[in-house]
Image: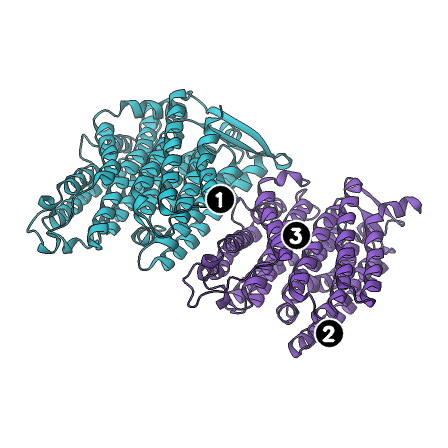
């Protein structure tokens, strides 16, 4: 018991901090809420380092302390801290400001549950915990758009969540255990594998915004504050992929599920980019682009179990995606929500322009940026798993993606019609931009820090 | 001293330093640019002085990068890359001097040029598959912004087409690199060359992927259509770098990757690749004949000249006799250098003409030889070189390529027809622009100034030197190619 709790220090710390944040919010001390959150996230990150190389599980195998869970913390916790700073920049001084911070930290706690889940029950707790907080975050602005988006998100989440719980009961029935490590017992029971798998794809695919479970994403991102959209687009999505990795790596590779996932991956990246090509609202544009990015991440999931590079691929691309997508959203916060708002930004604010170009090229997968390294790993995982055609579709979509991202780059260097305001960006956003640019540029060159 | 690394990264570091300077006026920016590219040129001369070794790579510089997947920072040189490195550093220096008149957002322009130089040198010197791809793609980004930011009328469309086309073109190479990696467990290109990791159908698929990538870059018919658009819209220095340096990525990759890493598949596909070369050479010549825009015409002659390079490499693979193989590869490599020198000069000259007249249409000029003798004679000399006149740079290269072709695949000699067509189109261009009745509109056109002469004269001297006494250059190339041929 004590050994188990010792491994859980980062999670416990975060849970305690979330409680404290709620208490502080009751006292309407928003700055204190933020400070508690940032300190707790920082401490948890540091405390993860000693157990990074541990490969074990706690509480009878239900919660895993392994490479996926460890690296997930190193990715999700700093990412959450950046999202808190972005939220601060956007909603400072508004009513219920602290609630947003507290909810964000709670959702991240759920994301950690997803990333470390070794048992069906933990998976369900993770899905519910991330879901509940996210619904509240989306409806924060309390206007019609946000309420509609929140309702869609809630209904979608409730239905997919129930389907998932229902389907998981098949696996429990077939394997005789709720532990994922026992899923090997399903070997040969194809109908049961399929039933449970459909459930997992529905439940996690919704969180990961895979086609065709992505409908909520553009509405929710657009209705929510930009910082919340940024947060949801990276943290809960990355967590869903970590959960995929935890669930599927022990599932027998039969019944053609890798092929089904490969089809979904291809559909997701293609649809995401095609839809992004026609958007004029920047938030929706990035929302569809992040749908497409989910398709790429799914390539890593397809390789699970056969390619030794599949898990590192998911981790590295997730890290890159968190950095570059948060950065792109931070630029949107400065520029504005419409594609037209980017007009001349690169000329008026050269550094902001360079930052955005770095993020967008990284999202396209241009070397030597971080997104490129992640994509190379994903392509290698897919090819090694025998899915050359998926890698080819991924490559063709990169070209489509370039079209999507250049639609944002080109207007930035046009002469603006009117003089642009030269307002200051504010310290929190400058910090976010600096960290994300350095990560996107630097970790591409120093990719050796990641596990291989 | 790690001269290769210094040469590669000095330009981009100078660019970053420029960005950090408080005063980023055009004067300062161009001084930084000329100083950096000049220093790199001197360093590459020192690299040349250090020399290369037969049968492998020399001056290797190595450092861990991503050990988990066997990717490392590896640079090195052989007789294929050294001439291209020298050509690259020379053309960037001349472009920097020529560009000193660019006033619009000069600092950004210079930073992009310097970034392109780093990417180009890195591409030729990289000995790691992943590193090669990184440099290869970075050059794409640099050129995109160069065309989109400083090009002519229709630059946005041309830049977008260039980027989409070449990105789509280069991604299959990534697949091939992944395939080579999965076959060998390392990204070390030396290992891939010494023991080609793929065989049978996998090797053929990798070859097809690589050939597609390099065919777009070279560019070979029918995937050449981005080239005229990009060239016409690009700023002059951009055109020079694009034609002089970046097209060589394609032919360099064809030898380094396709020929050396999937040798058996390359021999099997030799006739097909040869056919692509022949068609490109003929098509490029005839398409150039149909142009009235000088820049477009020169762009199409690039398709023609690079077609000869493809032919040289293909016949080297088909030839049974090692001596003939070496001749084919020697000729192909020399042709890359000659094309860089001659076409570089031609694009500079057309750029200078356009600076004066704001027009590139052949029929709008006439009798300029008497008005601007320096510009005129320089163009005539370069045009004669380009059409393959003996004594000028293209002759020894094309002679070797056709010699090897006649030996290994006689049918392909039909490509020699393209030389006649090229001669016709250049004579027509010279007649229309520089001879005939003087158009009074250009009565007070100034001749080349000192800076422009400084740019063009070194290229003309080298054109003649390579034509009359190519020994010094062929010796470098030959050192490596004897090993490749045998």
Say which mark, if any, is on residue B20: 1
Whether residue A255 appears in this view of the structure is no
- Secondary element under disc 1, as helix, strand or loop, is helix
- Does residue A283 appear to the left or right of A27 in the view shown? left
Distance of mark 3 from mark 1, alpha carbons? 45 Å
- Mark 2 residue crowding within 10 angstroms, few (<14) / some (14–19) / many (20+): few
Position of B475 relative to B156 (above/below) = above
Q: Position of residue A188 (x, y in %)?
A: 78, 53
Judge depth for marks 2 and 3 and give the one in front: 2
Whether residue B442 appears in this view of the structure is yes
Q: Position of residue A400 (x, y in %)?
A: 49, 58
Indicate the chain coloured cyan by its letter. B
Rendered residue at 41%/61% (across/down): A414
Q: Residue lying farthest left?
A: B437
Say which of B1 and A174 sits in front. B1
Say which of A221 and B431 sits in front. A221
Q: How is the image coloured?
A: by chain
């Amino acid at each position: 018991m004590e050994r188990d709790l010792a491994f859980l220090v980062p999670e416990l710390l975060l849970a305690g901090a979330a409680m404290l944040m709620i208490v502080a919010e009751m006292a309407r001390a928003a700055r204190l809420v933020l400070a508690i959150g940032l300190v707790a996230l920082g401490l948890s990150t540091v405390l993860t380092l000693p157990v990074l190389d541990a490969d074990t599980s706690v509480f009878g195998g239900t919660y895993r302390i392994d490479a996926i869970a460890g690296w997930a913390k190193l990715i999700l916790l700093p990412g959450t801290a950046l999202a808190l700073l972005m939220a601060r920049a956007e909603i400072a001084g508004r009513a219920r400001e602290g609630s947003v911070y507290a909810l964000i930290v709670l959702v991240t706690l759920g994301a950690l549950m997803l990333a470390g889940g070794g048992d069906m029950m933990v998976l369900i707790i993770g899905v519910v915990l991330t879901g509940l907080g996210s619904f509240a975050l989306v409806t924060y602005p309390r206007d019609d758009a946000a309420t509609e988006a929140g309702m869609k998100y809630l209904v979608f989440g409730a239905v997919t969540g129930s389907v998932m719980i229902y389907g998981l009961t098949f696996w429990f029935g077939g394997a005789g255990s709720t532990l994922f490590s026992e899923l090997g017992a399903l070997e040969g029971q194809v109908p049961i594998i399929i039933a449970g798998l459909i459930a997992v794809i529905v439940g996690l695919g919704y969180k990961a915004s895979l086609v065709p479970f992505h409908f909520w994403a553009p509405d929710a991102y657009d209705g929510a504050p930009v910082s919340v959209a940024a947060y949801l687009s990276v943290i809960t999505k990355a967590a869903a992929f970590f959960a995929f990795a935890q669930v599927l790596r022990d599932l027998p590779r039969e019944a053609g599920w890798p092929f089904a996932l490969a089809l979904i991956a291809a559909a997701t990246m293609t649809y995401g980019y095609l839809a992004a090509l026609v958007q004029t609202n920047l938030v929706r544009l990035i929302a569809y682009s992040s749908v497409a990015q989910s398709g790429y991440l799914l390539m890593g999931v397809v390789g699970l179990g056969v390619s030794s590079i599949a898990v590192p691929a998911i981790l590295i691309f997730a890290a890159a995606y968190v950095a570059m997508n948060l950065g792109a959203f931070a630029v949107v916060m400065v520029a504005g929500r419409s594609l037209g708002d980017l007009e001349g930004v690169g000329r008026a604010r050269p550094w902001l322009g360079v930052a955005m170009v770095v993020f967008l090229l990284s999202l396209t997968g241009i070397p030597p940026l971080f997104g490129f390294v992640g994509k190379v790993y994903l392509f290698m995982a897919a090819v090694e798993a025998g899915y050359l055609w998926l890698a080819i579709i991924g490559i063709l979509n990169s070209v489509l993606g370039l079209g999507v991202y250049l639609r944002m780059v080109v207007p930035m260097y046009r002469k603006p019609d009117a003089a642009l305001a030269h307002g200051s960006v504010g310290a929190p956003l400058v910090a976010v931009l600096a960290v994300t640019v350095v990560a996107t540029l630097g970790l591409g060159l120093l990719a050796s820090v990641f596990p291989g | 001293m790690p001269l290769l690394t210094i040469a590669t990264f000095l330009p981009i570091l100078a660019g970053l330093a420029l960005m950090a300077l408080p005063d980023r006026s055009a004067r300062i920016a161009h001084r930084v640019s000329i100083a950096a590219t000049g220093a790199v040129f001197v360093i590459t001369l020192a690299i040349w002085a250090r020399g290369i070794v037969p049968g492998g790579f020399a001056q290797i510089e190595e450092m861990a990068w991503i050990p988990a997947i066997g990717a490392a920072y590896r640079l090195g040189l052989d007789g294929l890359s050294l001439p291209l490195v020298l050509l690259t550093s020379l053309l960037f220096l001349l472009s920097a001097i020529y560009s000193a008149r660019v006033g619009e957002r000069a600092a950004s322009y210079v930073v992009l040029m310097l970034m392109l130089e780093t990417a180009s040198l890195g591409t030729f010197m990289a000995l790691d598959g992943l590193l090669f791809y990184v440099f290869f793609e970075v050059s794409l980004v640099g050129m995109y912004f160069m065309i989109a930011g400083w090009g002519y009328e229709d630059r946005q469309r041309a830049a977008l087409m260039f980027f989409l086309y070449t990105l789509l073109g280069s991604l299959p190479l990534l697949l091939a690199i992944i395939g080579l990696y999965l076959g060998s467990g390392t990204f070390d290109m030396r290992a891939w060359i010494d023991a080609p990791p793929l065989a049978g159908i996998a090797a053929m698929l990798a070859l097809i992927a690589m050939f597609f990538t390099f065919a777009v870059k070279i560019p070979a018919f029918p995937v050449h259509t981005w080239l005229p658009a990009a060239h016409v819209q690009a700023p002059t220095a951009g055109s020079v770098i694009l034609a002089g340096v970046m097209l060589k990525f394609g032919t360099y990759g064809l030898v380094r990757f396709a020929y050396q890493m999937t040798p058996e598949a390359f021999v099997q596909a030799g006739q097909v690749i040869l056919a692509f070369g022949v068609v490109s050479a003929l098509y490029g010549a005839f398409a150039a004949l149909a142009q009235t825009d000088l820049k477009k015409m020169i762009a199409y002659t690039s398709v023609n000249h690079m077609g000869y390079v493809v032919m040289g490499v293909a016949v080297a693979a088909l030839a049974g006799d090692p001596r003939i193989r070496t001749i084919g590869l020697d000729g192909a490599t020399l042709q890359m250098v000659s094309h860089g020198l001659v076409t570089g000069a031609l694009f500079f000259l057309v750029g200078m003409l356009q600076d004066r007249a704001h027009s590139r249409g052949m029929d709008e000029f006439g009798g300029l030889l008497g008005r601007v003798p320096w510009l005129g004679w320089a163009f005539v000399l370069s045009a004669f070189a380009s059409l393959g006149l003996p004594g000028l740079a293209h002759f020894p290269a094309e002679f070797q390529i056709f010699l090897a072709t006649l030996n290994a695949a006689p049918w392909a000699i039909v490509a020699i027809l393209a030389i006649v067509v090229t001669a016709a189109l250049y004579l027509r261009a010279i007649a229309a622009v520089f001879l005939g009745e003087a158009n009074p509109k250009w009565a007070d056109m100034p001749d080349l100034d000192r800076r422009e002469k400084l740019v063009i004269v070194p290229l003309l001297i080298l054109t003649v030197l390579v034509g009359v006494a190519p020994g010094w250059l062929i010796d470098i190339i030959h050192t490596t190619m004897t090993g490749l041929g045998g």
